[in-house]
Every structure is written in structure tokens, then in C-alpha cells.
Image: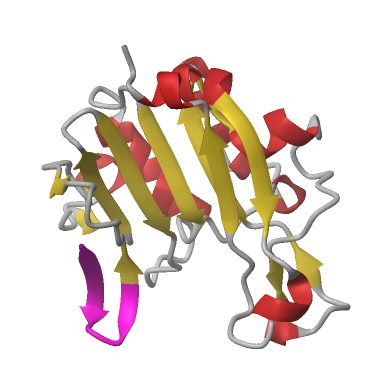
Amino acid sequence: MWIGDNRHKGLGIFAAEHLQIEPLDWSNVYKGHTESYSLPAQTVKYFLPCAVNKSIQLLGVWTHQNNSPTFGYIGQLWKYLQVNKQPLKKVLIAGDFNSNTIWDARDRWWNHSDVVRELQELEIESLYHKYFEEEQGKESKPTFFLHRKPQKPYHIDYVFGSRVFSRALTQLEIGNQEQWLKISDHLPLTCEFAAEERKLR
């Protein structure tokens, strides 16, 4: 599955042959703050929802600035959540949020911390922070290096999961820095879950 402005740059979800993935019809159009100004509703990007084996929801995320002076990056995810909270059941939300609590602003209600709080209200939590018992904004393991420079580390990639996943989580790893910086400025997050919980009974 793929979404993007062109075939060379976008957000993709790839699955092993024994897994079935199907797109979910979730809205990527936010109407809230534009209607009062008689402006067209805005398409937020990029979000790629799918069902895995007809039982697990997976939402791929790559937040963009999207030419928005105020609702770029984490603001895009905040908007997406406002119109898609209802269908979030047994879900994994994973990808490049381009965000961290350290960049919260006092005059915004769509900060990283606000998104984390709203997800927690839906019993969806960051699996990295649960596994390593660290606080948002105080991550010891970076996932991104600006311009691939080791002296510019940040934690901006996440996997959030419903309670069934946080209970079943057995291991979480971040890719080797030396290996992955040869091909990307991001490091992958890998999660493993107890087999019996993956059935989501």
C-alpha cells in the first residue's frame, strides 16, 4: 500500500506474503478550523490506514508541514485524530511523527503532549516509553539523526498501540546506528508481541 504526491516519495506499508492487508476508509479531510473562514477543508498528510488479516488495524504515519503555518507536522496528526477517533480499535499507529514533547509550544492545544494525552484517553500508548520506562521528551535512544550526523540525534519516530498490544509486547529494538545511517537518517523500530495476544481474542 502506498500514499504520496508521486511514486518516488511517500508512505508505504509492506507485508509478508502470509499477511493480508486491506485499506480502511478513514477520512484524511479535516474541516474544523477552516469552515469559520469559508475556506475549503484541508487534506492532512500522510496517513495510511489498513486492516491486517481483517483483525488488526495499522495506521502508518508520516506527518508533513503540508504548507500549514500553524498545523504542520504534529498538528496534522492532531487533526487526523479529531475525525478518526471513533474507528480506532485494536490499533497500531506507527511511523515518522516529526515531533517530540521538547518542541511543545505554550500557545497551542495540538502539541505532541496533547496528542499523546488524547491517545492515552483512548487507551493507546507509546510502546517505546512503556518498554523502556522513559518519559516523553526524555528518550535515551534516538530514532533520527539530522543530516545523518551522530551529533544531532532526536527521537521523532514512534509506535503506539492499544492495550492489547502494550500487554503483549515482549521486545522493542531500535536499529543499529552505524548500520542504518549508511542508507537513511532514520533508525527503524521493531516490536515483537506474544503470539497468543496477536490473535486478539
The image position of residue 200, as x and y in percent, is 34, 18
Reply above or below: 152 against 17.
Answer: below
Q: Quadrant of residue 187?
A: bottom right
- Assess whether residue 5 is covered by the magenta stretch: yes
Q: Determine the image quadrant of residue 197.
A: top left
The quarter of the picture where residue 4 lies is: bottom left
**Residue 42 horizontal/vertical position (percent):** 23, 57
**What residue is at 31 percent from the left and 11 percent from the top?**
201
**Looking at the image, is 120 positioned above or below residue 79?**
above
At x 59% / y 62%, what residue is drawn?
188
Quadrant showing the N terminus = bottom left
The residue under the point 31% across, 54% down is 47
Q: How is the image coloured?
A: secondary structure
Q: Position of residue 147 (x, y in %)?
A: 70, 86
- Who's the residue at 37% across and 69% down the image? 66
Residue 198 visible in the current orientation:
yes
Secondary structure mainly formed by the magenta segment: strand
Question: Visible in this render: residue 36?
Answer: no
Image: magenta residue range = 1-10
Q: Is residue 166 magenta?
A: no
